[in-house]
């Protein structure tokens, strides 16, 4: 009986610690254009992503500026449970997104239109928490697969070190 009680307490503690651990995605991230790899004419001039804790997931906001001067904004709140949520932006409603946490430093975002996944973004935060790489796979207007890799640096004042 003691072994069972010890095992139960240990498991409860481990789950509590994981659930209470700081989400490494939370913070302010700035795109490093020089380290990123985008398809021709798709690389933003600048992009800032802000994520903060919201329930069992995050509240996401981004601001992007392109070489032609066009600026866009997007935002949503989503749990890491795979349930689709609405994304709003400067041009109204955007493709819904769902988030799934793969491990503590990896999340996959799936964007859906007409019941089909139109893009997936794999977000990975480095072990030290200073870098985030977002690899997005989608189709272009001709149906060809396009892979873009955005490398982001944390710009929080109290950021961890790699």
Image (cartoon, rainbow, N blue to C red):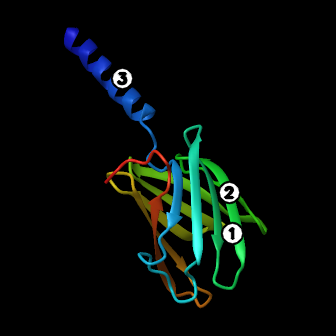
- State if disc 3 and disc 2 touch (CB < 8 Å): no
Where does residue 150 sit, x and y in percent of width and height?
47, 71
Where does residue 54 sit, x and y in percent of width and height?
60, 40
Residue for badge 1: 114
Nearer to me, 151 or 10: 151
Question: Where's the N terminus, which quadrant?
Answer: top left
* Disc ID at residue 12: 3
Question: Element type at marker 1?
Answer: loop
Where does residue 7 sit, x and y in percent of width and height?
25, 20
Question: Element type at marker 3?
Answer: helix
Of the two numbered discs 2 and 1 in the rendering, the one whose residue sits closer to the viewer: 2
- Outermost residue, front side: 157
**Which of the two discs, 2 and 1, labels the residue nearer the N terminus?**
2
Query: What distance separates the C-alpha of mark 2 from that of mark 1?
Result: 20 Å
**Which of the two discs, 2 and 3, labels the residue nearer the N terminus?**
3
Residue for badge 2: 75
Question: Where's the C terminus, which quadrant?
Answer: bottom left
């Amino acid at each position: 009986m003691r072994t069972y009680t010890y095992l139960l307490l240990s498991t409860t503690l481990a789950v509590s610690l994981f659930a209470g651990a700081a989400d490494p995605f939370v913070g302010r991230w700035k795109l490093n254009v020089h380290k990123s790899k985008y398809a021709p004419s798709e690389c933003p001039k600048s992009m800032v992503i802000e994520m903060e804790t919201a329930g069992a997931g995050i509240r996401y906001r981004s601001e992007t500026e392109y070489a032609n001067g066009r600026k866009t904004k997007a935002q949503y709140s989503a749990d890491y449970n795979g349930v689709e949520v609405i994304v709003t932006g400067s041009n109204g409603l955007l493709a819904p997104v769902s988030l799934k946490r793969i491990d503590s430093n990896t999340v996959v975002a799936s964007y859906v239109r007409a019941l089909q996944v139109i893009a997936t973004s794999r977000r990975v935060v480095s072990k030290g928490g200073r870098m985030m790489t977002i690899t997005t796979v989608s189709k272009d207007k001709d149906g060809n697969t396009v892979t873009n890799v955005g490398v982001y640096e944390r710009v929080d004042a109290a950021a961890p070190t790699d």
